[in-house]
Amino acid sequence: MAIPAGLTRTGSAPGRVNLIGEHTDYNGGFALPLAIPARTTARVRTRDDGVIVAASTAPGTEPARFAVGSSPGEVTGWAAYVAGVFWALRDAGHDVPGADVTIDSTVPSGAGLSSSHALEVAVAVTLNDLHGLGLDRTSLALLVQRAENHYVGAPTGTMDQMASLYGQDGHVILFDAQAMTAQPVPCDLPAAGLGLVVVDTRVHHDHVDGGYGARRATCEEAAALLGVRTLREVQGDAVDDVLGKLDDDVMVKRVRHVLTENARVLDTVALLRAGRAAETGPLLTASHASMRDDYEITVPEVDLAVEAALDAGALGARMTGGGFGGSVIALTTAAGQDAVGDAVRTAFDQHGYASPSVFTVRPAAGAGIEENSQ
Ligand code: GAF
């Protein structure tokens, strides 16, 4: 049945910070992200001419006009995130019509806070609701991953989408990428007298090219050499025994990061569940060292932000997200948040780096439809 023009719906989805568990998702492992208060809103209004007009309120973006049946490669730039979601839905057999799509976002882009997934998830939840597609949250996460992998061309996993879709106020989300489950774990930072500071280093990253895909390929190669489907399948084995079966030094380092990072996620969850959030700091800092030394995905600005935060009294600090730039998080006492921000700004100034953007976050709600948006 033809869908009339002019049906409208507005949905929104948050960015995320990953508390711990980096580059584990595509290895079938564990991650512990939280949805953050910054969100992306998608307003969708159906059209009956088979066209999508995507517009964004972000400065410097131009509206894009393309066919609803566009194929990967036809739409590039920011609008590819919109086009990719329509493509993935239609590819899965959902005959969604064209639309005017207006995007408005407070998630900083290129900061490692998952702005692209927030945009895609916002469009996906809105279309799901508007057209009554009945897709559950996990199906939407997988659909958005397809858009990202096949339309946008970034070989990312599913952690960001799951965080954006399953986020809950006052909770971090224990994501098990093998089981594709998302379990809320209480994490009321203010009640624990803690704060979570984000430092956007302003070193922008891009997972379409370069290091991200190379890390993923090395892990897949290691899994094949070990005779398992993903590294998760050797998670219970002694790390040294697993590493002893690999010859290549770089591969050994990559696998060591993944296996030890999964263990750090589970240790963090155990501390949170025991009401000992302040004691998770050393695990966060160890995660950073592992990303710096074994996974080799940090950059000098990110390492400096971690060092400065720790010197200023942070309980723990680490890069968050895919790496090669982006943001650092620092777990602090509530009273210590300002000192950490000041110290990082001063250190950046002394090194001649561009001034970072510093703000605090707390676990916030996941994606949803705005009330009265019809
Ligand atoms: C990026 C990816 F999109 C995620 O899937 C994940 O791999 C992350 O990097 C690293 O943990 O955000």
Image (cartoon, rainbow, N blue to C red):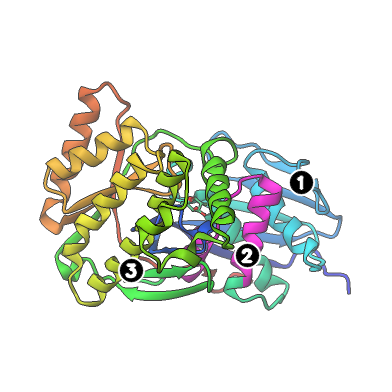
Q: Quadrant of the C terminus?
A: bottom right
Amino acid carrying mark 1 in the image: Pro
Q: Residue at x 55, y 56 (%)?
A: 223
Is tag 2's residue or tag 3's residue first in the polypeptide sequence? 2
Q: Which mark is residue 72?
A: 1
User: Percent position (x, y) of residue 304?
Assistant: 25, 34
In the displayed structure image, the side of residue 252 where residue 158 appears, left or right: right
Residue appearing at x 16%, y 63% in the figure = 278
Q: Residues within 10 Å of mark 3 (few under 14, many from 20)?
A: some
Q: Which residue is mark 3?
A: 266
Q: Is residue 90 left or right of residue 305?
A: right
Residue 17 placement (x, y as % from top left) = 38, 55
* Magenta-span inclusion, residue 135: no
Q: Amino acid at mark 2?
A: Leu
The disc placed on residue 142 is 2
Q: Residues in magenta?
A: 139-167
Amino acid under disc 3: Leu
Residue 9 in view of the camera: no
Q: Residue at x 61, y 76 (%)?
A: 136
Q: Which of pointers 3 and 1 indicates the residue nearer the eye?
A: 3
